[in-house]
Amino acid sequence: LYVGAVLFDSDPDHIVAQYLEQDFDTHSDDVFGVTLDPFLDRRNSFMFLVNPRGAVKDGQTFDNSRTANLAWEGVIEVKTSIHDRGWTVELAIPFTTLRYDPRRENQSWGVNFLRRLRRRNEDSYWAPLDRRSRVHTMALAGTLTGLSGLPRPRNLTIKPFVLADHSGGDVVPDAVSGADWDGGMDLKYGVTSRLTLDLTYRTDFSQVEVDQERVNLTRFSLFFPEKRDFFVENAGLFTFGDLSERNYRMGASPRDFTLFHSRRIGLYQGRPVPIVAGGRLTGRVGSFDVGFLNMQTEATPDLSRELFSVARVRRSFGGVIQVGGLVASRDGLGSGTPDYNRSYGVDANLRIRDKLLIHSYLSATQYPGREGNNRAARVSAAFRDRLWDISALYREIGDAFDPGIGFVARRGIRHTYGTVGAHPRPAIPHVNELNPYLELDYITNLESALETRKGTVGLGVAFLDGGALTFSASDRLEVIDEAFPVAGRGLVSEGRYSFREGSLGYRSNAARHLSGEVRVSGGGFYDGSRRSISVGGGWRPSPHFGLELGVERNEIDLPDDSFTADVLGARVDLAGSTRSFLSAFFQYNTASEDRVINLRYNFIHSPLSDLFIVYSQRQNPDEGGVLERTVTLKATKLLSF
């Protein structure tokens, strides 16, 4: 399938094209995009976005753009050219890249096109959309006809890999220290045109970038997102828990609770656990969306072998009601005592005219020695029209609710949330939208004794160039039943604390060669005070070079201690072409004294086939010097049959 476009521009010297990297930031560049719905179900699509330099971001979207699989990668060819009339783009999309029903002789597909003119913060669509819709909102897409005699898609791809590495450091076990080599493969098989089987053997993620360092100023666990491609792909199908929704304030998000969080597989205390093999079956069977995942990890000095299993079933009724269920299991293998964790849940979501959203779930867990309330439940409603934002939520998390492959930030609570806001578009120069709002969080324990009360008034200002200004002020009450340390230093004692805090932030237009953001916050902090500032900036003088710097400083004053907890980060990106990239990432966390270096080179030697060279190091002078150091060489090759 060939797609071509001429994108006229009266000022071609100011075309915005800052990236050569694959999966680039599409909100910072001029973009041409195409979405295809080969089954004409008006729900799902393949998406291809291209900037004027030929960088590509592709993915799959589902349920009329409500979930996306941006880890999906398809084989395509792209050519672009910038000239005195604007720029042109040509895409060659092999039919083997797409999924469709080859039995249909004459086919009609859903289709839409996007043109983004970034310096004007302007999006244009071939099939008209409203402001809240996107190019992959396929219910409003147009139709492509005249497709006949299409070839049968290839059903099998295999991607083998080989790697050699050398590991060392004070905390690296002797069993994995030194030089080693390994190999494995990923296999993808199209069981049907709508059902895909993925198999993996000796799974390796050594090329994945390290996590961003953070300072925890709360008494709860921090949520870190999944970055490993195998788990990111089709992750939307397995989503269950506190959902977030674009343009809505929901009161809770997956950072608060998710029944399945794939980072619990193959990682332990931030270090990789070898994965022996695994499989995933995802797609559509009849009227049902289905997903099955099974992974097995090797034994380590700290862990026994484990088996992870997840099953997800979901069905939509007319795009209005969606109901489903999820079952997850974590089993220790080779242990003499019972070692298992089971999680169950059902959820139901209702969407009325893309204005009223109702989300609900009911979930429970089982494991040896469980005592207490093992259930979690939620019901929420959110309304948004051209002017108003109104949301309300109630959720309850049991004190013994512990999903073995999930994430829960806070247990043993009853949480009530409400917010009222507006988003008018006043006739103010340079202003696109104002977002004033009020919100209230009220959290008790399971006996209805108050733990947290927080009232907030806020204002957001969205500018026409894509920048934004935010302000908030909060009045907060916290009841602490058990003392806890802050950033490993000062101690917050048991007691009842009332304090106020505020924040002010600004984010500039990301399409400029020099862009940045700053956020200042502070006020009371339990029986002390807090002052925080974070500053980040990026400089991209050309698509071949990018520099990002970030500083976060936290000054904490408590009765028994006063200290600072800072995070410094620097990143350099070099791109030789759309196939060759080098990145260097340095971080320093003063709270833990960790210094982290991650160097990563990627050469795409053929479509979806890579060569990686990665160097990673974690150093801490307080703990003896170099804790971990790894050098890895990895090569992959895609084979299609």
Image (spheres, rainbow, N blue to C red):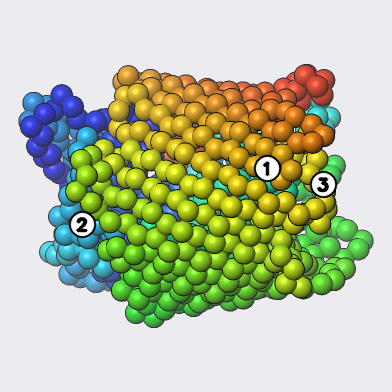
* Residue 7 visible in the shown view: yes
Is residue 588 rendered to the left or right of residue 34? right
Would residue 235 be found to the left or right of residue 269 on screen? left
Q: Mark 3 belongs to which amino acid?
A: Ser
Q: Earlier in the sequence, mark 1 or mark 2?
A: 2
Q: Is residue 386 left or right of residue 606?
A: left
Marks 3 & 2, CB-CB < 8 Å contact? no
Q: Secondary structure at mark 2?
A: strand
Q: Which label was assigned to residue 398?
A: none
Disc assigned to residue 112: 2
Quickly name the residue at label 1.
525
Mark 2 residue type: Asn
Q: Nearer the viewer, residue 242 or 427?
A: 427
Report crowding for label 1: few under 14, some 14 to 19, many 20 or more residues within 10 A (C-alpha): many
Q: Which residue is mark 3?
A: 493
Quote the CA–CA distance across marks 3 and 1.
12 Å
In this view, the mark in front (3 or 2): 3
Residue at 41% x, 36% y is: 506
Considering only order in the chain, which callout, 2 or 3, is on the residue closer to the N terminus?
2
Relative to the observer, which residue lies in front, 480 or 488?
A: 480
